[in-house]
Amino acid sequence: MAFITVDQEKCNQDGICVAECPGRIIQMDPEDEYPRATSDFGDFCLRCGHCVAVCPTGAMRLDWFGPEECKQIKQELGVTPEQAEQLLCGRRSIRAFKEKSVPRTVLEKLLEVACSAPSAKNQQPWHWIVVEDPAEVRRLASMVVDSIRRAIKKAPEEAEAMGLPRVVASWDEGYDRICRGAPHIIVAHADKNWPFSTEDCTLALSLLDLYATSIGLGACWAGYFYKAVNAYPPLFEALGLPSDHLAFGAMMLGYPKFSYQRIPPRNPIRVNWIG
Ligand SMILES: Cc1cc2nc3c(=O)[nH]c(=O)nc-3n(C[C@H](O)[C@H](O)[C@H](O)COP(=O)(O)O)c2cc1C
C-alpha cells in the first residue's frame, strides 16, 4: 500500500502536510522534495485526514479518500466572535418541549455534526441510539423511575442525599423529571474498555447540543437516564446495548416551548495564572 499519493502537478512542495501530520509520518523525500509516507505510516496514521484537508492545492490523496470526498470549507460562512459567543453562552438546557417530533433527516444531520467532534486517537468510538417515538421515551423514563425506586430501597440515605425521592414523587404526580416530556432521547454509547469513551462521547453530545440550538431545537443532558442505563439491566437490555459497551451520555431533544431572553451569569472564573 502506498498510503498517500501526491499529485506532483498540483503539489507546490510547501511542506504543510509534513508540518501538520500529528504522527510525523509524512516526510519530504530528500531526493525529489515531494512528500512521502514514512515506512511506519501504516502503524501510526490516525486516519485524521489532516494532510488532505490542509493541502492548499488539493495535491494530497490518502488510499481511502481524497480531496473530492471532503466537504469544502466555505470561508464566507465563518461566524463572527459575537455570533459564536451568543451561541455558546446562550445555549440553555431545555426542559419544556412542544409536542412535535423532530424529522428523521434532522436527527441524522445532528448525528453527522456530533460525529465531527474530536476524539482521542481519532477513534470516534461513539455509537448512537435515537428513541424516535415519544411514547417509547415515556416507557423508558418509567424504567428509569423503577431503577430509582430500587436505588431508594437499597440505600435510602444515599438516595435522599441525591434528591431521588423527589424525582419519584414528581413522576407519581405526573411530572417527568427524567426526560422532561422531550419527544426524543439520544444515547451515546461506546466500548467500556476504551479509556477515552467518556470524553469522546461527551464532546460529541456537546456538539450535538450546540448544533441543535443553532437550528432551533432544544436539548438537555439526561443524567438520570444514562446513569440508569448502566445501572439497571432491564433498561440496558431494552435499549439493546452490546454487553461490552456503556452509555456515556444521553440528551433529551425536541422543539423548545419557550425562548430565552437573557444569559444567566456563571460563577466567577477560578483560575491560577502561572508564569
Ligand atoms: C452530565 C450532566 C447531566 C445532567 N443531567 C440532567 C438531568 O438529568 N436533568 C436535567 O433536567 N438537567 C440535567 N443537566 C443539565 C444541568 O442541570 C444544566 O446544564 C445546568 O443547570 C446549567 O444550565 P444550562 O445548561 O442551561 O446552562 C445535566 C447536565 C450535565 C452536564
Image (tube, rainbow, N blue to C red):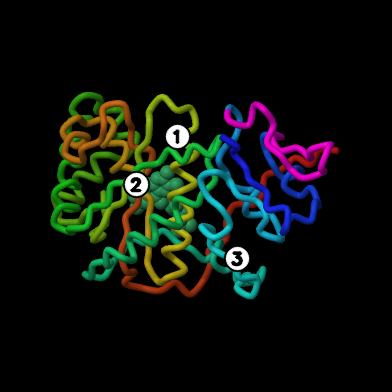
Q: Residue at horizontal 32%, vertical 59%?
A: 253
User: Of helix, strand and loop, which one carries label 1?
Assistant: helix
Q: Counting residues from the N terminus, which is met first, the one under dot 2 or under dot 1?
A: 1
Magenta run includes residue 25: yes
The 10 Å Cα crowd at callout 1, few under 14, some 14 to 19, many 20 or more, is many
- Which dot, 1 or 3, sits closer to the camera? 3
Q: Which residue is mark 1?
A: 197
Amino acid identity at mark 3: Ile
Q: Which residue is mark 3?
A: 73
- Which dot, 2 or 1, sits closer to the camera? 1
Residue 208 vs residue 104, the one in the foreground: 104
Magenta run includes residue 240: no
Q: Which residue is mark 2?
A: 250
The 10 Å Cα crowd at callout 2, few under 14, some 14 to 19, many 20 or more, is many
Residue 115 vs residue 31, the one in the foreground: 31
Q: What is the span of residues highlighted in magenta in the rendered image?
A: 24-42
Q: Residue at horizontal 32%, vertical 69%?
A: 255
Ligand 1 under 8 Å from disc 2 Cβ:
no
How far from the left and from the top, in percent, is residue 164? 27, 39
How far from the left and from the top, in percent, is residue 86? 57, 69
Q: Quadrant of the N terminus?
A: top right
